Amino acid sequence: MNRTLSSSLLLTLFALMGIGLVQVYSSSYVFAIETYNDGLFFFKKQLLFSAIGLFVVYAVTQVSFQWIRNWGWTLWVASSALVLLTWVSGIGVKVGGAHRWIQLPFGLRFEPAEVLKIGFVLLMATLIARSNEMNPKRILTWSAFILIPMLLVLKQPDFGTFALLTAVGFSLLFIFGLPWSIIIGSVLSLIPAFYFIVMTVPYRKARVMAFLDPWSESQEKGFQAIQSMLSFHSGSLWGTGLGQGQGKLFFLPEAHTDFTLAVLGEEMGFIGLFIVLSLFGFVVYRGFQLAMKTNDRFLKASCLGLALVFGITTVINAGMSMGLLPTKGMALPFLSYGGSSLISSCLLFGLFLKLESEILNKDKSRTRISKILES
């Protein structure tokens, strides 16, 4: 890796991956024994995914930055094609009524929407960098690139990813000068659309109602939220101790995936929760800090976009676990079990490291030039 890479992001990456492995082991052990007669079933898979993820990080840092600038947007095209394949019989896998996965060898599955998030950032960064040379025909082309895959994701259905991409897209356009009138008009027009998407679909409406009053359906739709909050309450300040949590003993559904933060809160307490969320916060902070260091529109938009994807994903999962948002199946980066999420998070970190290297190199070059001019 480039010598200009700072150690802060690398240390954060290794810390999150290490905590994630411990968390998967702790939260899945009992469930794995009961289901697969192997307490290490999920841990061994996550260990394999971690090795693949580290290779992805290394591979991305070795790619030419110029190639990422010129062709990074093709990740959006490739992942969009994979999203389309989830609907193809024999390739796509339908689980729980959703067409989100592609079947891989050895019983593994891949969720293209996870990579689509990263591709979206690179697509938006390319669009923003080329905004001065946009014409109506190109705008229509880019709009099709953006909207069609997002509608496919919504159709899967995966409302969480659709909402995430919408939020990141509007945030980037706002940061880079989209007029307030268009922002307000777009938001106002989206309110009835989001209302229709949520409130006309029975299971989404039920999630919202359960969020507003989980105790009204304490044994059904509100069960997950209540058990999650009870786990946080049991953890108190210092936690019950690693492996000693009770929520994962079939009280808390999806303990090793969507609600892994509740398990961590119970076993490691507020202190452990604060440390982990601080690591997530540092990644977002570093992304914004890097964006402030450069005037290059592509670099700035990429750093901001990656930070927003990482930050909003964390906020959605944490908010859901703490009862601050309606329940939604969105993995917590690094800590939730799942190869697609983990490898996608590693891809995001690899890009962060590559962008950081480029920005620091440029900053060092400017410093040298300034010293030469001053002398």
Image (cartoon, grey):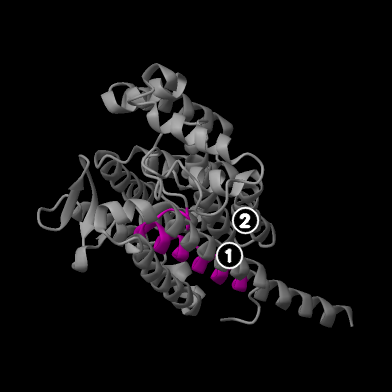
**In the rendered structure, which segment of residues is drawn in magenta?**
333-358
In percent of width and height, residue 52 lies at 39, 72
Left or right of 202 in this view: 66: right
Relative to residue 247, is residue 84 drawn left or right? left
Residue 221 picture quarter = top left
Q: Amino acid at mark 2?
A: Leu
Q: CA distance from mark 2 to mark 1?
A: 8 Å
The residue that label 1 is drawn on is 15
User: What residue is rendered at 60% in x and 53% in y?
Assistant: 276
User: Dot 1: what SS?
Assistant: helix
Residue 201 % position (x, y): 27, 25
Checking the image for residue 286, the label placed there is none
Which of the image's four quarters has the C terminus? bottom right
Reply above or below: 209 against 50. above
Nearest the viewer among 262 and 293 is: 262
Most distant residue in the left direction: 89
Q: Nearer the viewer, residue 166 or 127?
A: 166
Give the overall secondary structure of the magenta segment.
helix
Residue identified by numbered label 2: 279
